[in-house]
Image (spheres, helix red, strand yellow):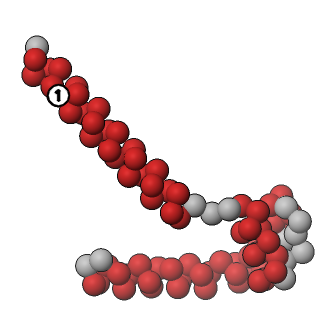
Amino acid sequence: MADQVHRSWLMRKFESAIQRGFMRAYHQVRVDPARFLMHLRSAHSLPISSYEGVFQLDLRLLDGIAVPRLVFGASRTGAWDSQGA
């Protein structure tokens, strides 16, 4: 019985530590939706005033923005993996 209580306590501590770690990481990498929308509009000259406006855009235009970013991100991630980071 004591072993069961000890595991339960240990599991709660472990889950709590994992949750705190994920929340700390989230706060460091989260994206402000309003700032990101403003960046999309200004950096890529998109005629949108909300995220719903993105659905009205031609997919070729969006692919032209997204594909180079995905390739760059994938190559950067690959470089990190090769360095063991």
Query: How packed is label 1: few (under 14 Cα within 10 Å), some, or many (20 or more)?
Result: few
What residue is disc 1 on?
7
Q: Give residue 80's position: percent from left, percent from top.
A: 35, 81
Q: Give residue 71's position: percent from left, percent from top.
A: 53, 83
For the point 15% across and 20% down, the residue is 4
Q: Is residue 1 above or below residue 29?
A: above
Q: Give residue 42's position: percent from left, percent from top.
A: 81, 80
Name the image quarter holding the C terminus.
Answer: bottom left
Foreground: 72 or 8?
Answer: 8
What's the residue type where badge 1 is placed?
Arg
Q: Residue furthest top?
A: 1
Apparent side of residue 72 relative to residue 5 in the rendered image (left or right) = right
Foreground: 53 or 11?
Answer: 11
Q: Is residue 2 above or below residue 78?
A: above
Q: Which corner quadrant of the image does residue 2 belong to?
A: top left
Apparent side of residue 45 relative to residue 60 in the rendered image (left or right) = right
Q: Is residue 55 visible?
A: no
Name the image quarter holding the N terminus.
Answer: top left
For the point 27% across and 40% down, the residue is 14
For the point 76% across and 63% down, the residue is 34
Q: Give residue 27's position: percent from left, percent from top.
A: 52, 57
Q: Is residue 4 visible?
A: yes
